Image (cartoon, rainbow, N blue to C red):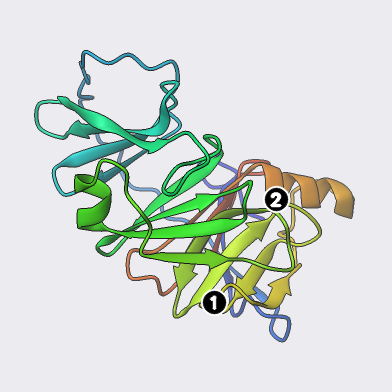
């Protein structure tokens, strides 16, 4: 691993995320000039203890934030006016058991993964933004691994970070398990497999490219950025 400008950050380009091809190629990241960005302060009449995620869909800010009634708060992007709460808590159709969810905007759809149910709810943009109690147009239940993080589509498949045993898991479009990937990045210090496994799965951020052709995974421990494709 190279140290670039005192940052322990390296890109590992994987030739494959399947079990057949597991060779790394290392590419140092080119660090450009820093730019100054003036933050915009969001002022709204609705208070939030914590905001865990924020996504933008058309003119709407979708915040993953628990207000006691639901796990998503919708605001107007221009004037920060509160619109309503989505992801209402309950046991009925369209309701959520808790706020253990992840949200991604994929093309014109809103995809919400419920960690407790291991289920992906897919909504059309209009349904999620306009219905008071949105009902998913499509539901995908995932098998094999009972828990997953950061589940998203990728070239007609679904990819996730399971909570146990493996690094990435690949599913077909119906949520049926296909294969997993167990190779860990090389940390600067020698760490045993259990420590590497915990660091990569628990202290990690994974996100697809906008065109869904590849995905990147940033491991906080060791500062390792991995770019993968199937």
Residues at marks 1 and 2, CA–CA distance in whole angstroms: 26 Å
Does 214 appear above or below 172?
above
Residue 37 coordinates in the image, percent (x, y): 23, 30
Q: Residue at x 46, y 73 (%)?
A: 154
Estimate how packed mark 1 is, as few (under 14), some (14 to 19) or many (20 or more) residues with alpha carbons within 10 Å.
Answer: few
Does 139 appear above or below 155?
above
Left or right of 178: which side holds 59? Answer: left
Give the SS element for disc 2. helix
Q: Nearer the viewer, residue 75 or 229?
A: 75
Q: Residue at x 56, y 67 (%)?
A: 159
Give the SS element for disc 1. loop
Left or right of 111: which side holds 200? Answer: right
Q: Which residue is the extreme one toward the front? A: 92
Q: Which residue is mark 2?
A: 200
Q: Nearer the viewer, residue 67 or 48?
A: 67
Q: Residue at x 51, y 52 (%)?
A: 113
Q: Quadrant of residue 136?
A: bottom left
Can residue 36 be seen in the rendering of this structure? no
Mark drawn on residue 174: 1
Q: Split into 4 quadrants, where in the image is the C terminus?
A: bottom right
User: Going from the N terminus, do you reach mark 1 or mark 2 first?
Assistant: 1
Q: Residue at x 48, y 63 (%)?
A: 152
């Amino acid at each position: 691993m190279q140290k670039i400008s005192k940052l322990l950050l390296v890109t590992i380009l994987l030739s494959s995320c399947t079990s057949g091809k597991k060779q790394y190629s290392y590419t140092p990241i080119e660090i450009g000039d820093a730019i100054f960005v003036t933050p915009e302060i969001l002022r709204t009449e609705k208070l939030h203890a914590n905001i865990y995620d924020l996504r933008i869909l058309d003119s709407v800010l979708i915040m993953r934030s628990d207000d006691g009634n639901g796990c998503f708060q919708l605001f107007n992007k221009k004037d920060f006016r509160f619109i309503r709460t989505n992801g209402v808590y309950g046991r009925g159709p369209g309701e959520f058991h808790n706020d253990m969810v992840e949200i991604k905007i994929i093309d014109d759809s809103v995809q919400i993964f419920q960690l407790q149910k291991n289920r992906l709810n897919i909504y059309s943009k209009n349904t999620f933004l306009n219905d008071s109690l949105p009902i998913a147009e499509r539901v995908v239940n995932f098998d094999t691994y009972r828990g997953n993080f950061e589940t998203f589509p990728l070239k007609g498949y679904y990819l996730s970070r399971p909570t146990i045993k493996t690094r990435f898991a690949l599913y077909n479009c119906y949520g049926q398990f296909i294969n997993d990937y167990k190779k860990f990045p090389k940390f600067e210090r020698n760490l045993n497999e259990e420590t590497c496994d915990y660091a990569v799965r628990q202290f990690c951020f994974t996100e697809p490219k906008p065109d869904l052709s590849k995905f990147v995974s940033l491991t906080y421990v060791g500062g390792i950025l991995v770019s993968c494709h199937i």
